């Protein structure tokens, strides 16, 4: 588990900026594992104690470096606009080079340090989940409208696309994900069920019209 240190007050915003900038630079250059507190301190020109007075661990420092205060006060006029806002905001959040480098390590750290997960969740996704509640009222017939399921889907897709597939066309990916989540593959469960029923009925009718030999010729008169 990552070592944790006692925090002190933030006395110098310029020092904070230098440390966070150094962390972002090193993530892109060396990756998460090689971005140590010693390396960050040396790049920023500060001491280790100065860093540990501000952040309890490397993971907390990296989390703040790649996820500065986020959120938008812009209110979407309707459900499609809200869906697009969340999708594009999430992709933008995970799309930077430093975030792509940091996320695999941060995900492992969050499993070891629940406080890191709670801190990130409170800053990143909890406000969005609460906002989505006003747009996505869940119902027994549409469980996919649950805000948690929706946001997990968006975040999971963005993480895999950015950190594993390492895609570059963020706008194209956002548009594709918007189309999938707004319009779906089969539509609602009810429409999908009706479509399957209609397909089965058509196949049965087609089979009844065939001759025993398997062709479509009518019996000779």
Image: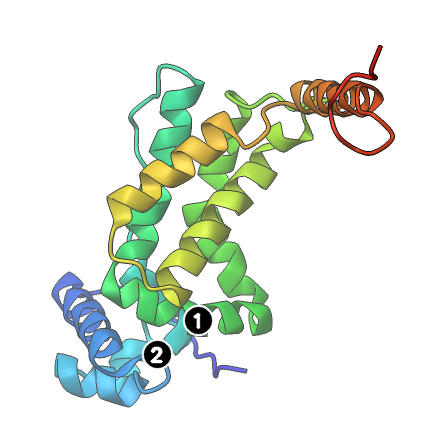
Q: Position of residue 160 (x, y in %)?
A: 44, 59
- Residue 6, quarter of picture: bottom left
- Along the horizontal axis of the image, is 36 left or right of 137? left
Taking depth in this image into account, of 144 and 66 the one nearest to the observer is 144
Task: Answer with mark 2 or mark 1, whichever residue precedes in sequence.
Answer: 2
Residue at 33 percent across and 64 percent down: it is: 166
Point out the image quarter for the C terminus: top right
In the picture shown, does residue 193 fall above or below 31?
above
Vertical side of 128 occupied by 93: above or below? below
Q: Nearer the viewer, residue 130 or 170?
A: 170
What's the residue at 35%, 78% (across, down)?
32
Residue ranking furthest to the right: 212
Secondary structure at numbered mark 1: helix
Mark 2 lies on a secondary structure that is loop
Q: Position of residue 116 (x, y in %)?
A: 49, 64
Label number found at residue 104: 1
Cα–Cα span, label 2 and label 1: 8 Å
Judge whether residue 47 can be spotted in this image.
no
Q: Between 49 and 173, which is closer to the camera in this rendering?
A: 173
* Residue found at x 57% / y 33%: 147
| Residue 8 spot, x, y in % from top left | 34, 70
Residues at marks 2 and 1 touching, judged by CB atoms closer than 8 Å: yes
> What residue sits right under mark 2 in the picture?
32
Asked whether, in this view, residue 187 is left or right of residue 52, the answer is right
**Rendered view: 164 above or below 205:** below
């Amino acid at each position: 588990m990552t070592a944790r240190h006692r925090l002190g007050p933030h006395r110098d915003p310029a020092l904070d900026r230098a440390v966070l900038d150094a962390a972002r630079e090193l993530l892109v250059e060396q990756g998460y594992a090689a971005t140590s507190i010693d390396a960050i301190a040396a790049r920023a020109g500060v001491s280790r104690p100065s860093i540990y007075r501000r952040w309890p661990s490397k993971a907390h420092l990296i989390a703040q470096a790649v996820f500065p205060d986020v959120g938008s006060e812009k209110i979407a006029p309707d459900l499609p606009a809200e869906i697009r806002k969340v999708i594009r905001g999430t992709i933008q959040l995970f799309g930077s080079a430093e975030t792509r480098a940091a996320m695999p390590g941060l995900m492992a750290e969050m499993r070891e340090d629940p406080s890191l997960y709670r801190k990130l969740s409170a800053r990143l996704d909890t406000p969005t989940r609460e906002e989505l509640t006003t747009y996505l009222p869940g119902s027994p017939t549409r469980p996919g409208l649950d805000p948690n399921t929706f946001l997990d889907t968006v975040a999971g897709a963005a993480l895999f696309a950015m950190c594993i597939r390492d895609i570059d066309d963020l706008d194209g990916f956002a548009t594709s994900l918007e189309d999938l989540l707004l319009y779906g593959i089969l539509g609602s469960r009810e429409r999908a069920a009706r479509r399957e029923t209609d397909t089965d009925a058509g196949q049965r009718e087609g089979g009844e019209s065939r001759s025993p030999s398997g062709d479509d010729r009518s019996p000779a008169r």
